[in-house]
Image: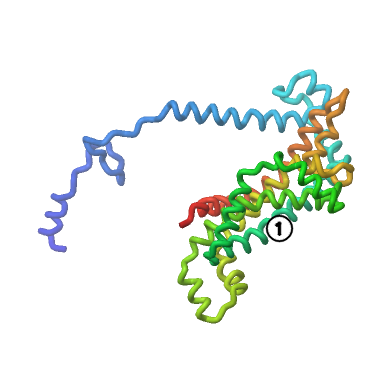
Amino acid sequence: MTQTQAGTVAERRPATPPGTPAGRPARGPGRRLPRGNYPAGFAALLWLAVVVIPLYVLVISTLQDRASYLENGPLSLPTSPSLDSYQRVLEGEFPRYLLNTLVVTVSCAAIAVVLSVTVAYTVVRNRSAISRRTFQLFLLGLAIPSQAVIIPIYWLITELQMYDTLMAVILPTAAFSLPVSVLILVGTMRDIDEELYESMALDGASQTRILLQLVVPMSRAGISTVGVFAALGAWNGFLFPLILTQSQENRVLTLGLYDYIGEYRADIPALLSAVVLSIVPIFTAYLFARRQLINGLMGVGGR
């Protein structure tokens, strides 16, 4: 660059006002700094308090014994924190309830994933009237609450001689998670490019190979969403275990919490300790699958 060109570029470059830090562009005369949204910030603080205070009460109460909890109340800090309530929970029937809940949760999630993948693939690839009616039938299941059909389900379970077994809880829970699962996977599979299906078909691939090598890998987000949704429903299920089981050997966590509440007593620290311990596994699973869960839900409204 010649000296004349360098001088011309220097003349065109805007002068930096005095007091402006180096490297920061000067603010134009028409620009204004954004104002803070104080009502939204205040509402966010209120919502934070609504979320944090129950968690604080939950955790602090587990560190107190029964006497100090009844004397000082749930909002007070423990004078001598202790893990005795957790010890009482782990020494009781809680491990058995946890194992039963894990069996129910994993079984329901596996059944929901396998059945919903095959049904959704049939709905997407087969455009016949029967396929459309089948999809509409599954969508109709979204409008049927489990409480409305608990008596027929109880009759079926007793006729099949499965009452008071874990299978009596697994089958209805998995069935009621299928409508939403099929809806999610249909939206996910419809987003797969039609040319990919045609290219594999031209290569001589069977429907099973297309499903396993194309559809399943490209629908991982939706499948993860279905698995997490079915697992959450099974983990938090209360109605089916309450009606379809009776013995202590087949109880799950939601029913096992009643062990700490009696007619003339209530061990609140132990009860809340059991709640904390029951939250940890499903919360950990959600942390690892939250991204797939969000991506899968975004694909529900596919074309």
Q: Within the image, what quadrant is residue 224 found in?
A: bottom right
**Residue 44 image offset from top left, x and y in percent:** 51, 30
Q: Residue at x 48, y 26 (%)?
A: 42
Q: Residue at x 76, y 32 (%)?
A: 62
Is residue 162 positioned above or below 21 on the image?
A: below
**Residue 254 image offset from top left, x and y in percent:** 77, 39
Q: Secondary structure at mark 1?
A: helix
Quadrant (top left, top right, bottom left, bottom right) of the N terminus = bottom left
In the picture provided, is 169 more to the left or to the right than 186? right
Is residue 68 positioned above or below 258 on the image?
A: above
Residue to which mark 1 is pinned: 111
> Residue lying farthest top?
71
Q: Within the image, what quadrant is residue 8 found in?
A: bottom left
Q: Residue at x 76, y 45 (%)?
A: 152
Is residue 254 positioned above or below 121 on the image?
A: above
Between residue 259 and residue 146, name the one nearer to us: 146
Q: Residue at x 57, y 62 (%)?
A: 131
Q: Mark 1 belongs to which amino acid? A: Ile
In the picture provided, is 93 more to the left or to the right than 122? right
**Residue 198 image offset from top left, x and y in percent:** 48, 74
Total numbered badges shown on the rendered structure: 1
Between residue 197 and residue 44, name the one nearer to us: 197
In the picture provided, is 184 more to the left or to the right than 6? right
**Residue 270 image offset from top left, x and y in percent:** 81, 33
> Residue lying farthest left?
4
